[in-house]
Image (cartoon, rainbow, N blue to C red):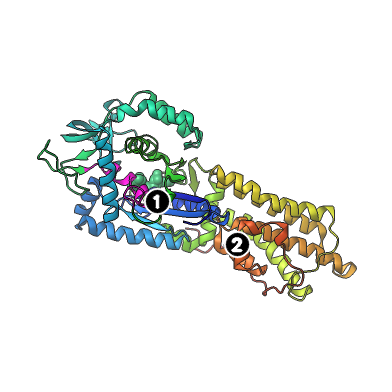
Amino acid sequence: MSERPTYMITTAIPYANGAPHIGHAYERIATDAFARFKRLDGYDVLFVTGMDEHGQKMQRTAEKEGLSPQGLADRTAAQFARMGEALNARADDIVRTTQDRHKQAVLEIWRRMEANGDIYLSKYSGWYSVRDEAYYDESELTERDGKRFAPTGTPVEWVEEESWFFRLSAYADKLLAYYQAHPEFITPDHYRNEIIAFVKRGLTDLSVSRTTFDWGIPIPPSPQTNASHVMYVWVDALTNYITATGWLTKEGDKSGFWPADAHVIGKDITRFHAIYWPAFLMSAAAPLPKQIVVHGFLFSRGEKMSKSVGNVVDPIELADRYGVDQLRYFFLREIPFGQDGNYSHEGIVMRINADLANDLGNLAQRSLSMINKNCAGAVPKKGALTEADNDILAQAAFALDKARAAMNDYAPHHALAEIFRVVAEANRYFAGEEPWAKKKTDPARMETILYVTAETLRRLAIPLQPFIPEAAGKLLDLLGVGPDSRDFAHADAANALQEGAPLPPPAPVFPRFVETEEGAA
Ligand code: ME8
Protein backbone atom coordinates (compact mmCIF):
# COMPACT_ATOMS: atom_id res chain seq x y z
CA MET A 1 0.00 0.00 0.00
CA SER A 2 1.38 3.43 -0.88
CA GLU A 3 1.39 6.63 1.17
CA ARG A 4 -1.36 8.08 -0.96
CA PRO A 5 -4.91 8.09 0.39
CA THR A 6 -6.91 5.11 -0.86
CA TYR A 7 -10.18 5.19 -2.74
CA MET A 8 -12.21 2.12 -3.59
CA ILE A 9 -15.17 2.26 -5.96
CA THR A 10 -17.33 -0.53 -7.35
CA THR A 11 -20.08 -1.11 -9.86
CA ALA A 12 -22.91 -3.53 -9.20
CA ILE A 13 -22.05 -6.97 -10.51
CA PRO A 14 -24.31 -7.67 -13.48
CA TYR A 15 -26.28 -10.90 -13.69
CA ALA A 16 -24.38 -13.24 -15.95
CA ASN A 17 -27.56 -14.45 -17.63
CA GLY A 18 -27.56 -11.96 -20.50
CA ALA A 19 -25.39 -9.74 -22.66
CA PRO A 20 -24.45 -6.22 -21.55
CA HIS A 21 -26.96 -3.49 -22.29
CA ILE A 22 -26.85 0.26 -22.17
CA GLY A 23 -27.68 0.43 -18.44
CA HIS A 24 -24.58 -1.64 -17.71
CA ALA A 25 -22.52 0.56 -20.01
CA TYR A 26 -23.76 3.70 -18.31
CA GLU A 27 -22.91 2.43 -14.84
CA ARG A 28 -19.46 1.25 -15.95
CA ILE A 29 -18.63 4.55 -17.67
CA ALA A 30 -19.74 6.66 -14.71
CA THR A 31 -17.82 4.52 -12.23
CA ASP A 32 -14.76 4.65 -14.47
CA ALA A 33 -14.98 8.45 -14.60
CA PHE A 34 -15.16 8.66 -10.78
CA ALA A 35 -12.20 6.27 -10.49
CA ARG A 36 -10.12 8.17 -13.05
CA PHE A 37 -10.91 11.47 -11.37
CA LYS A 38 -9.61 10.26 -8.01
CA ARG A 39 -6.55 8.68 -9.60
CA LEU A 40 -5.63 11.97 -11.29
CA ASP A 41 -6.26 13.70 -7.97
CA GLY A 42 -3.53 11.66 -6.29
CA TYR A 43 -5.45 8.76 -4.75
CA ASP A 44 -4.44 5.11 -4.78
CA VAL A 45 -7.57 3.79 -6.50
CA LEU A 46 -9.13 0.33 -6.58
CA PHE A 47 -11.91 0.09 -9.15
CA VAL A 48 -13.79 -3.19 -8.95
CA THR A 49 -16.50 -4.77 -11.04
CA GLY A 50 -17.66 -8.37 -11.26
CA MET A 51 -20.20 -10.92 -12.40
CA ASP A 52 -23.18 -12.26 -10.48
CA GLU A 53 -23.06 -15.87 -11.64
CA HIS A 54 -25.17 -17.89 -9.18
CA GLY A 55 -28.88 -18.18 -8.50
CA GLN A 56 -32.09 -19.53 -9.88
CA LYS A 57 -32.26 -17.03 -12.74
CA MET A 58 -28.85 -18.19 -14.00
CA GLN A 59 -29.80 -21.82 -13.65
CA ARG A 60 -33.08 -21.37 -15.54
CA THR A 61 -31.56 -19.27 -18.36
CA ALA A 62 -28.77 -21.80 -18.82
CA GLU A 63 -31.30 -24.64 -19.04
CA LYS A 64 -33.28 -22.70 -21.66
CA GLU A 65 -30.17 -22.09 -23.72
CA GLY A 66 -28.92 -25.64 -23.41
CA LEU A 67 -25.77 -24.57 -21.56
CA SER A 68 -24.32 -25.37 -18.17
CA PRO A 69 -24.67 -22.44 -15.77
CA GLN A 70 -20.87 -22.10 -15.73
CA GLY A 71 -20.78 -22.17 -19.54
CA LEU A 72 -23.34 -19.37 -19.67
CA ALA A 73 -21.41 -17.39 -17.03
CA ASP A 74 -18.16 -17.76 -19.00
CA ARG A 75 -19.79 -16.58 -22.19
CA THR A 76 -21.33 -13.54 -20.51
CA ALA A 77 -18.16 -12.69 -18.58
CA ALA A 78 -16.28 -12.53 -21.90
CA GLN A 79 -18.94 -10.17 -23.31
CA PHE A 80 -18.62 -7.87 -20.29
CA ALA A 81 -14.83 -7.91 -20.52
CA ARG A 82 -15.15 -6.79 -24.17
CA MET A 83 -17.56 -4.05 -23.12
CA GLY A 84 -15.07 -2.75 -20.52
CA GLU A 85 -12.37 -2.54 -23.21
CA ALA A 86 -14.67 -0.98 -25.78
CA LEU A 87 -15.76 1.76 -23.38
CA ASN A 88 -12.20 2.45 -22.20
CA ALA A 89 -13.48 1.60 -18.73
CA ARG A 90 -11.37 -1.28 -17.60
CA ALA A 91 -11.58 -2.12 -13.88
CA ASP A 92 -8.63 -3.13 -11.69
CA ASP A 93 -10.35 -6.34 -10.66
CA ILE A 94 -13.30 -8.44 -11.76
CA VAL A 95 -14.85 -10.56 -9.04
CA ARG A 96 -16.74 -13.52 -10.44
CA THR A 97 -18.92 -15.12 -7.80
CA THR A 98 -17.89 -18.61 -8.93
CA GLN A 99 -14.25 -17.91 -8.03
CA ASP A 100 -12.80 -19.73 -5.07
CA ARG A 101 -11.54 -16.54 -3.37
CA HIS A 102 -15.14 -15.31 -3.39
CA LYS A 103 -16.54 -18.55 -2.05
CA GLN A 104 -14.11 -18.28 0.88
CA ALA A 105 -15.23 -14.72 1.59
CA VAL A 106 -18.91 -15.70 1.51
CA LEU A 107 -18.37 -18.63 3.85
CA GLU A 108 -16.52 -16.31 6.22
CA ILE A 109 -19.27 -13.67 6.29
CA TRP A 110 -21.79 -16.46 6.90
CA ARG A 111 -19.67 -17.87 9.73
CA ARG A 112 -19.44 -14.44 11.34
CA MET A 113 -23.17 -13.75 11.04
CA GLU A 114 -23.90 -17.18 12.51
CA ALA A 115 -21.42 -16.64 15.34
CA ASN A 116 -23.21 -13.39 16.11
CA GLY A 117 -26.48 -15.30 16.60
CA ASP A 118 -28.17 -13.84 13.53
CA ILE A 119 -28.78 -17.05 11.56
CA TYR A 120 -31.52 -19.56 12.39
CA LEU A 121 -33.37 -22.37 10.64
CA SER A 122 -37.06 -22.07 9.87
CA LYS A 123 -39.47 -22.44 6.99
CA TYR A 124 -40.08 -19.82 4.34
CA SER A 125 -43.42 -19.51 2.68
CA GLY A 126 -44.03 -16.49 0.57
CA TRP A 127 -43.54 -14.78 -2.77
CA TYR A 128 -40.34 -14.79 -4.77
CA SER A 129 -39.41 -13.09 -8.03
CA VAL A 130 -36.76 -15.04 -9.90
CA ARG A 131 -36.13 -12.10 -12.26
CA ASP A 132 -35.31 -9.85 -9.28
CA GLU A 133 -33.99 -12.73 -7.14
CA ALA A 134 -36.00 -11.09 -4.37
CA TYR A 135 -38.65 -11.92 -1.79
CA TYR A 136 -41.72 -9.70 -1.61
CA ASP A 137 -44.33 -9.18 1.01
CA GLU A 138 -47.93 -9.92 -0.01
CA SER A 139 -48.82 -6.26 0.62
CA GLU A 140 -46.31 -5.10 -2.03
CA LEU A 141 -47.81 -7.13 -4.88
CA THR A 142 -50.30 -6.20 -7.56
CA GLU A 143 -52.61 -8.64 -9.31
CA ARG A 144 -53.30 -8.81 -13.05
CA ASP A 145 -55.12 -11.57 -14.94
CA GLY A 146 -54.93 -13.84 -11.91
CA LYS A 147 -51.15 -13.42 -11.71
CA ARG A 148 -49.22 -11.54 -9.07
CA PHE A 149 -46.44 -9.07 -9.78
CA ALA A 150 -43.69 -7.43 -7.72
CA PRO A 151 -43.48 -3.61 -7.53
CA THR A 152 -40.76 -3.89 -10.20
CA GLY A 153 -43.29 -5.45 -12.61
CA THR A 154 -41.71 -8.91 -12.54
CA PRO A 155 -43.85 -12.01 -11.91
CA VAL A 156 -43.64 -13.66 -8.50
CA GLU A 157 -44.10 -17.31 -7.60
CA TRP A 158 -45.09 -18.96 -4.35
CA VAL A 159 -42.17 -20.58 -2.51
CA GLU A 160 -42.40 -22.90 0.46
CA GLU A 161 -39.21 -24.45 1.72
CA GLU A 162 -36.99 -24.93 4.69
CA SER A 163 -34.64 -21.99 4.90
CA TRP A 164 -31.96 -20.36 6.96
CA PHE A 165 -32.98 -16.89 8.08
CA PHE A 166 -31.00 -13.77 8.85
CA ARG A 167 -32.31 -11.76 11.80
CA LEU A 168 -32.83 -8.59 9.76
CA SER A 169 -35.64 -7.41 12.06
CA ALA A 170 -33.05 -6.84 14.78
CA TYR A 171 -31.24 -4.29 12.60
CA ALA A 172 -34.02 -1.80 11.80
CA ASP A 173 -33.18 0.58 14.64
CA LYS A 174 -29.44 0.22 14.15
CA LEU A 175 -29.82 1.02 10.45
CA LEU A 176 -32.01 4.05 11.14
CA ALA A 177 -29.46 5.33 13.66
CA TYR A 178 -26.73 4.76 11.08
CA TYR A 179 -28.55 6.69 8.33
CA GLN A 180 -29.10 9.51 10.81
CA ALA A 181 -25.45 9.63 11.86
CA HIS A 182 -24.21 9.33 8.25
CA PRO A 183 -26.53 11.42 6.12
CA GLU A 184 -24.22 10.97 3.12
CA PHE A 185 -24.52 7.16 3.24
CA ILE A 186 -27.20 6.97 0.54
CA THR A 187 -26.93 9.56 -2.18
CA PRO A 188 -28.77 11.34 -3.82
CA ASP A 189 -31.14 12.25 -0.98
CA HIS A 190 -34.41 11.10 -2.49
CA TYR A 191 -33.22 7.49 -2.49
CA ARG A 192 -32.17 7.92 1.12
CA ASN A 193 -35.64 9.12 2.03
CA GLU A 194 -37.23 6.11 0.32
CA ILE A 195 -35.00 3.71 2.24
CA ILE A 196 -35.62 5.41 5.58
CA ALA A 197 -39.39 5.27 5.02
CA PHE A 198 -39.12 1.57 4.13
CA VAL A 199 -37.07 0.66 7.21
CA LYS A 200 -39.37 2.70 9.46
CA ARG A 201 -42.24 0.43 8.46
CA GLY A 202 -40.28 -2.38 10.14
CA LEU A 203 -38.13 -5.17 8.74
CA THR A 204 -38.91 -8.86 8.68
CA ASP A 205 -36.23 -11.52 8.89
CA LEU A 206 -34.71 -12.46 5.57
CA SER A 207 -34.60 -15.92 4.08
CA VAL A 208 -30.95 -16.39 3.15
CA SER A 209 -30.80 -19.90 1.75
CA ARG A 210 -32.60 -21.96 -0.87
CA THR A 211 -33.08 -25.71 -1.15
CA THR A 212 -35.02 -26.14 -4.41
CA PHE A 213 -32.03 -25.70 -6.76
CA ASP A 214 -28.31 -26.07 -6.36
CA TRP A 215 -26.53 -23.40 -8.44
CA GLY A 216 -25.01 -21.47 -5.59
CA ILE A 217 -22.49 -21.59 -2.77
CA PRO A 218 -23.33 -24.56 -0.52
CA ILE A 219 -23.98 -23.74 3.11
CA PRO A 220 -21.78 -25.79 5.46
CA PRO A 221 -23.57 -28.87 6.86
CA SER A 222 -25.40 -28.43 10.14
CA PRO A 223 -26.75 -30.99 12.64
CA GLN A 224 -30.06 -29.11 12.43
CA THR A 225 -30.94 -30.23 8.90
CA ASN A 226 -30.34 -32.92 6.29
CA ALA A 227 -31.40 -30.69 3.42
CA SER A 228 -28.71 -29.16 1.20
CA HIS A 229 -28.96 -25.41 1.19
CA VAL A 230 -27.31 -22.93 -1.14
CA MET A 231 -26.68 -19.33 -0.19
CA TYR A 232 -29.34 -16.80 -1.18
CA VAL A 233 -27.85 -15.15 -4.24
CA TRP A 234 -27.89 -11.64 -2.75
CA VAL A 235 -25.81 -12.66 0.29
CA ASP A 236 -23.44 -14.20 -2.22
CA ALA A 237 -23.45 -11.26 -4.67
CA LEU A 238 -23.15 -8.40 -2.16
CA THR A 239 -20.13 -10.04 -0.56
CA ASN A 240 -18.23 -9.63 -3.85
CA TYR A 241 -17.32 -6.11 -2.81
CA ILE A 242 -15.31 -7.31 0.13
CA THR A 243 -13.89 -10.33 -1.74
CA ALA A 244 -11.95 -7.93 -3.93
CA THR A 245 -10.05 -6.62 -0.90
CA GLY A 246 -9.43 -9.90 0.94
CA TRP A 247 -10.48 -8.10 4.13
CA LEU A 248 -12.56 -11.02 5.46
CA THR A 249 -10.13 -13.76 4.59
CA LYS A 250 -6.99 -11.74 5.34
CA GLU A 251 -5.55 -12.58 1.96
CA GLY A 252 -3.54 -10.41 -0.41
CA ASP A 253 -2.47 -6.82 0.11
CA LYS A 254 -5.68 -4.99 -0.71
CA SER A 255 -7.44 -5.19 2.64
CA GLY A 256 -6.52 -1.55 3.35
CA PHE A 257 -9.02 -0.56 0.66
CA TRP A 258 -11.95 -1.76 2.78
CA PRO A 259 -14.35 -0.15 3.57
CA ALA A 260 -15.11 0.86 0.00
CA ASP A 261 -15.69 4.55 -0.60
CA ALA A 262 -18.54 4.11 -3.04
CA HIS A 263 -20.80 1.37 -4.40
CA VAL A 264 -22.28 2.74 -7.61
CA ILE A 265 -25.63 1.05 -8.31
CA GLY A 266 -28.91 1.54 -10.15
CA LYS A 267 -32.07 2.62 -8.36
CA ASP A 268 -33.73 -0.82 -8.56
CA ILE A 269 -31.27 -2.39 -6.12
CA THR A 270 -31.09 0.21 -3.35
CA ARG A 271 -32.91 -2.04 -0.87
CA PHE A 272 -30.21 -4.68 -1.14
CA HIS A 273 -27.34 -2.22 -0.84
CA ALA A 274 -28.67 0.21 1.72
CA ILE A 275 -30.52 -2.25 4.00
CA TYR A 276 -29.35 -5.84 3.62
CA TRP A 277 -25.67 -5.18 2.96
CA PRO A 278 -25.03 -2.85 5.91
CA ALA A 279 -27.03 -5.20 8.17
CA PHE A 280 -24.90 -8.19 7.08
CA LEU A 281 -21.74 -6.17 7.67
CA MET A 282 -22.89 -4.97 11.10
CA SER A 283 -23.62 -8.57 12.02
CA ALA A 284 -20.20 -9.68 10.72
CA ALA A 285 -18.49 -6.83 12.62
CA ALA A 286 -17.07 -5.43 9.39
CA PRO A 287 -16.87 -1.73 8.52
CA LEU A 288 -19.63 -0.38 6.27
CA PRO A 289 -19.02 1.13 2.82
CA LYS A 290 -18.91 4.90 3.01
CA GLN A 291 -21.48 5.66 0.34
CA ILE A 292 -24.13 3.99 -1.76
CA VAL A 293 -24.22 6.10 -4.90
CA VAL A 294 -27.44 5.59 -6.83
CA HIS A 295 -28.02 6.34 -10.49
CA GLY A 296 -31.28 6.39 -12.41
CA PHE A 297 -32.45 4.27 -15.31
CA LEU A 298 -31.82 4.85 -18.96
CA PHE A 299 -34.63 4.69 -21.44
CA SER A 300 -34.60 4.58 -25.19
CA ARG A 301 -36.78 7.54 -26.23
CA GLY A 302 -38.71 7.22 -22.99
CA GLU A 303 -39.32 3.50 -23.36
CA LYS A 304 -38.01 0.74 -21.20
CA MET A 305 -35.50 -1.46 -22.97
CA SER A 306 -37.03 -4.76 -23.78
CA LYS A 307 -36.24 -7.60 -26.11
CA SER A 308 -39.85 -7.70 -27.31
CA VAL A 309 -39.91 -3.98 -28.21
CA GLY A 310 -36.62 -4.56 -30.02
CA ASN A 311 -34.90 -1.49 -28.57
CA VAL A 312 -32.09 -3.24 -26.74
CA VAL A 313 -28.85 -1.86 -28.14
CA ASP A 314 -25.42 -3.32 -27.83
CA PRO A 315 -23.23 -0.70 -26.12
CA ILE A 316 -20.19 -1.84 -28.11
CA GLU A 317 -22.06 -1.00 -31.32
CA LEU A 318 -22.90 2.45 -29.96
CA ALA A 319 -19.26 3.10 -29.09
CA ASP A 320 -18.27 2.00 -32.61
CA ARG A 321 -20.86 4.20 -34.22
CA TYR A 322 -20.37 7.42 -32.26
CA GLY A 323 -16.91 7.04 -30.78
CA VAL A 324 -16.03 5.98 -27.24
CA ASP A 325 -15.38 9.43 -25.83
CA GLN A 326 -18.44 10.78 -27.59
CA LEU A 327 -20.64 8.14 -25.96
CA ARG A 328 -19.00 8.67 -22.56
CA TYR A 329 -19.48 12.41 -22.86
CA PHE A 330 -23.13 12.07 -23.82
CA PHE A 331 -23.98 9.85 -20.85
CA LEU A 332 -22.09 11.90 -18.30
CA ARG A 333 -23.11 15.34 -19.54
CA GLU A 334 -26.70 14.74 -20.62
CA ILE A 335 -28.08 12.72 -17.73
CA PRO A 336 -28.25 14.38 -14.32
CA PHE A 337 -26.63 11.66 -12.23
CA GLY A 338 -29.20 10.05 -9.94
CA GLN A 339 -32.10 10.79 -12.26
CA ASP A 340 -33.53 8.73 -15.09
CA GLY A 341 -32.38 9.68 -18.55
CA ASN A 342 -33.10 9.15 -22.20
CA TYR A 343 -30.89 8.40 -25.07
CA SER A 344 -31.61 8.77 -28.74
CA HIS A 345 -29.59 9.10 -31.90
CA GLU A 346 -30.54 12.79 -32.21
CA GLY A 347 -29.60 13.49 -28.59
CA ILE A 348 -26.18 11.92 -28.95
CA VAL A 349 -25.44 13.65 -32.26
CA MET A 350 -26.50 16.99 -30.87
CA ARG A 351 -24.09 16.72 -27.94
CA ILE A 352 -21.24 15.56 -30.17
CA ASN A 353 -21.64 18.33 -32.70
CA ALA A 354 -22.54 21.22 -30.40
CA ASP A 355 -20.21 20.65 -27.46
CA LEU A 356 -17.39 18.45 -28.66
CA ALA A 357 -16.95 19.33 -32.34
CA ASN A 358 -18.07 22.98 -32.33
CA ASP A 359 -17.05 24.29 -28.95
CA LEU A 360 -14.03 22.30 -27.84
CA GLY A 361 -12.85 20.84 -31.16
CA ASN A 362 -13.01 24.11 -33.10
CA LEU A 363 -11.30 26.16 -30.44
CA ALA A 364 -8.44 23.66 -30.30
CA GLN A 365 -8.23 23.36 -34.06
CA ARG A 366 -8.32 27.11 -34.78
CA SER A 367 -5.86 28.12 -32.10
CA LEU A 368 -3.42 25.29 -32.66
CA SER A 369 -3.32 25.71 -36.42
CA MET A 370 -2.70 29.47 -36.01
CA ILE A 371 0.13 28.65 -33.63
CA ASN A 372 1.54 26.14 -36.07
CA LYS A 373 1.49 28.66 -38.94
CA ASN A 374 2.54 31.78 -37.08
CA CYS A 375 4.66 30.75 -34.14
CA ALA A 376 7.05 28.30 -35.81
CA GLY A 377 5.19 25.30 -34.38
CA ALA A 378 6.11 26.17 -30.80
CA VAL A 379 4.33 27.54 -27.74
CA PRO A 380 3.82 31.28 -28.47
CA LYS A 381 5.52 34.06 -26.54
CA LYS A 382 3.50 35.56 -23.73
CA GLY A 383 3.58 39.37 -23.43
CA ALA A 384 1.95 41.45 -20.71
CA LEU A 385 -1.46 40.01 -19.82
CA THR A 386 -4.66 42.03 -20.07
CA GLU A 387 -7.63 41.74 -17.76
CA ALA A 388 -9.38 39.54 -20.33
CA ASP A 389 -6.36 37.22 -20.49
CA ASN A 390 -6.15 36.88 -16.74
CA ASP A 391 -9.86 36.39 -16.47
CA ILE A 392 -10.06 33.43 -18.86
CA LEU A 393 -6.97 31.82 -17.32
CA ALA A 394 -8.47 32.15 -13.86
CA GLN A 395 -11.78 30.67 -14.99
CA ALA A 396 -9.96 27.72 -16.53
CA ALA A 397 -7.97 27.16 -13.34
CA PHE A 398 -11.11 27.37 -11.23
CA ALA A 399 -12.93 24.83 -13.42
CA LEU A 400 -10.89 22.05 -11.81
CA ASP A 401 -11.94 23.08 -8.30
CA LYS A 402 -15.56 23.21 -9.36
CA ALA A 403 -15.29 19.86 -11.13
CA ARG A 404 -13.72 18.36 -8.03
CA ALA A 405 -16.55 19.62 -5.83
CA ALA A 406 -19.12 18.23 -8.28
CA MET A 407 -17.38 14.84 -8.49
CA ASN A 408 -17.23 14.63 -4.69
CA ASP A 409 -21.01 14.93 -4.86
CA TYR A 410 -21.13 12.31 -7.62
CA ALA A 411 -22.48 14.86 -10.08
CA PRO A 412 -20.45 14.40 -13.28
CA HIS A 413 -23.04 16.40 -15.23
CA HIS A 414 -22.25 19.45 -13.09
CA ALA A 415 -18.51 18.92 -13.49
CA LEU A 416 -18.85 18.81 -17.28
CA ALA A 417 -21.30 21.70 -17.38
CA GLU A 418 -18.74 23.85 -15.58
CA ILE A 419 -15.82 22.82 -17.78
CA PHE A 420 -17.84 23.42 -20.93
CA ARG A 421 -19.09 26.75 -19.62
CA VAL A 422 -15.44 27.82 -19.57
CA VAL A 423 -14.89 26.28 -23.03
CA ALA A 424 -17.69 28.54 -24.28
CA GLU A 425 -16.11 31.54 -22.49
CA ALA A 426 -12.79 30.70 -24.10
CA ASN A 427 -14.47 30.70 -27.51
CA ARG A 428 -15.89 34.13 -26.78
CA TYR A 429 -12.46 35.31 -25.65
CA PHE A 430 -10.84 33.99 -28.81
CA ALA A 431 -13.48 35.50 -31.10
CA GLY A 432 -13.43 38.81 -29.22
CA GLU A 433 -9.64 39.16 -29.22
CA GLU A 434 -9.41 38.38 -32.96
CA PRO A 435 -5.82 37.09 -33.04
CA TRP A 436 -6.03 36.76 -36.85
CA ALA A 437 -6.62 40.54 -37.12
CA LYS A 438 -3.61 41.25 -34.88
CA LYS A 439 -1.32 39.22 -37.10
CA LYS A 440 -0.26 42.29 -39.11
CA THR A 441 -1.06 45.10 -36.69
CA ASP A 442 0.34 43.67 -33.46
CA PRO A 443 1.99 40.25 -33.87
CA ALA A 444 3.24 40.21 -30.27
CA ARG A 445 -0.31 40.62 -29.03
CA MET A 446 -1.42 37.86 -31.40
CA GLU A 447 1.12 35.57 -29.77
CA THR A 448 -0.08 36.45 -26.30
CA ILE A 449 -3.70 35.68 -27.24
CA LEU A 450 -2.65 32.35 -28.73
CA TYR A 451 -0.59 31.57 -25.65
CA VAL A 452 -3.50 32.34 -23.33
CA THR A 453 -5.83 30.20 -25.45
CA ALA A 454 -3.42 27.27 -25.47
CA GLU A 455 -2.83 27.50 -21.73
CA THR A 456 -6.59 27.72 -21.17
CA LEU A 457 -7.00 24.56 -23.23
CA ARG A 458 -4.34 22.82 -21.14
CA ARG A 459 -6.08 23.76 -17.90
CA LEU A 460 -9.38 22.42 -19.24
CA ALA A 461 -8.00 19.28 -20.90
CA ILE A 462 -6.53 18.10 -17.59
CA PRO A 463 -9.88 17.84 -15.74
CA LEU A 464 -11.53 16.52 -18.91
CA GLN A 465 -9.39 13.36 -18.88
CA PRO A 466 -11.65 11.28 -16.60
CA PHE A 467 -14.63 11.86 -18.88
CA ILE A 468 -13.11 11.72 -22.36
CA PRO A 469 -9.74 10.11 -21.73
CA GLU A 470 -8.63 9.55 -25.29
CA ALA A 471 -9.55 12.95 -26.70
CA ALA A 472 -8.29 14.87 -23.68
CA GLY A 473 -5.04 12.91 -23.96
CA LYS A 474 -4.79 13.79 -27.63
CA LEU A 475 -5.36 17.45 -26.87
CA LEU A 476 -2.61 17.35 -24.22
CA ASP A 477 -0.33 15.68 -26.80
CA LEU A 478 -1.03 18.55 -29.20
CA LEU A 479 -0.19 21.04 -26.45
CA GLY A 480 3.10 19.25 -25.84
CA VAL A 481 2.15 18.24 -22.28
CA GLY A 482 4.16 15.14 -21.30
CA PRO A 483 2.58 12.05 -19.72
CA ASP A 484 4.00 12.89 -16.28
CA SER A 485 2.50 16.37 -16.25
CA ARG A 486 -1.17 15.49 -16.65
CA ASP A 487 -2.43 14.85 -13.15
CA PHE A 488 -4.36 17.48 -11.25
CA ALA A 489 -1.31 18.55 -9.29
CA HIS A 490 0.04 19.85 -12.61
CA ALA A 491 -3.03 21.85 -13.58
CA ASP A 492 -1.89 25.04 -11.86
CA ALA A 493 -0.05 28.10 -13.15
CA ALA A 494 3.30 26.81 -11.90
CA ASN A 495 3.14 24.16 -14.60
CA ALA A 496 1.94 26.44 -17.38
CA LEU A 497 3.07 25.91 -20.99
CA GLN A 498 6.65 27.02 -21.58
CA GLU A 499 7.16 29.65 -24.28
CA GLY A 500 9.10 28.26 -27.21
CA ALA A 501 8.49 24.59 -26.35
CA PRO A 502 8.04 22.69 -29.62
CA LEU A 503 4.55 21.45 -30.51
CA PRO A 504 3.53 18.56 -32.77
CA PRO A 505 1.62 19.37 -35.96
CA PRO A 506 -2.06 20.12 -35.22
CA ALA A 507 -4.68 17.45 -35.86
CA PRO A 508 -8.45 17.47 -35.34
CA VAL A 509 -9.55 16.28 -31.89
CA PHE A 510 -13.31 15.96 -32.40
CA PRO A 511 -14.71 15.47 -35.89
CA ARG A 512 -18.34 16.38 -36.46
CA PHE A 513 -20.75 13.47 -36.60
CA VAL A 514 -21.95 13.30 -40.19
CA GLU A 515 -25.22 11.50 -40.82
CA THR A 516 -25.11 8.47 -43.04
CA GLU A 517 -28.07 6.29 -43.99
CA GLU A 518 -27.02 3.87 -41.30
CA GLY A 519 -26.36 6.59 -38.72
CA ALA A 520 -29.87 7.94 -39.02
CA ALA A 521 -31.41 4.54 -38.29
O1 ME8 B 1 -29.07 -6.13 -10.43
N1 ME8 B 1 -30.46 1.89 -16.80
O2 ME8 B 1 -27.69 -7.11 -12.00
P1 ME8 B 1 -28.27 -6.42 -13.33
C1 ME8 B 1 -29.49 2.08 -15.91
N2 ME8 B 1 -26.80 -8.81 -10.25
N3 ME8 B 1 -28.98 1.11 -15.14
C2 ME8 B 1 -29.50 -0.11 -15.26
C3 ME8 B 1 -30.53 -0.41 -16.17
C4 ME8 B 1 -31.02 0.67 -16.97
N4 ME8 B 1 -31.98 0.52 -17.87
N5 ME8 B 1 -30.83 -1.71 -16.05
C5 ME8 B 1 -30.01 -2.22 -15.09
C6 ME8 B 1 -28.20 -6.90 -10.74
N6 ME8 B 1 -29.21 -1.25 -14.62
C7 ME8 B 1 -27.49 -7.71 -9.68
C8 ME8 B 1 -26.56 -6.79 -8.93
S1 ME8 B 1 -24.76 -6.24 -7.03
C9 ME8 B 1 -24.20 -7.02 -5.67
C10 ME8 B 1 -25.80 -7.43 -7.80
C11 ME8 B 1 -28.19 -1.38 -13.56
O3 ME8 B 1 -27.46 -7.03 -14.42
C12 ME8 B 1 -28.76 -1.98 -12.30
O4 ME8 B 1 -29.45 -1.02 -11.55
O5 ME8 B 1 -29.73 -6.54 -13.39
C13 ME8 B 1 -27.50 -2.47 -11.61
O6 ME8 B 1 -26.88 -1.44 -10.89
C14 ME8 B 1 -26.64 -2.91 -12.79
O7 ME8 B 1 -27.19 -2.29 -13.96
C15 ME8 B 1 -26.61 -4.42 -12.98
O8 ME8 B 1 -27.93 -4.88 -13.16
The amino acid sitting under disc 2 is Ala
Furthest residue to the left?
226
Distance in Å between CA atoms under marks 2 and 1: 33 Å
**For mark 1, what is the residue?**
255
Q: Is residue 479 magenta?
A: no
Residue 285 in the image, given as x and y percentages of width and height: 35, 38
The amino acid sitting under disc 1 is Ser
> Which residue is at a point 90% across and 67% down the rendered structure image?
441
Pick whichever, 398 or 366, lies toward us. Answer: 398
**For mark 2, what is the residue?**
472
| Left or right of residue 286: residue 469 | right
Residue 276 in the image, given as x and y percentages of width and height: 34, 36
Pick whichever, 39 or 512, lies toward us. Answer: 39
User: Which type of secondary structure does the marked residue at label 1 adopt?
Assistant: helix
Q: Which residues are magenta?
A: 231-250
Whether residue 305 is visible to the viewer of this picture, yes or no, is: no
> Which residue is at a point 45% across and 49% down the rendered structure image?
9
Residue 76 in the image, given as x and y percentages of width and height: 31, 58
Q: Nearer the viewer, mark 2 or mark 1?
A: 1
Whether residue 368 is visible to the viewer of this picture, yes or no, is: yes
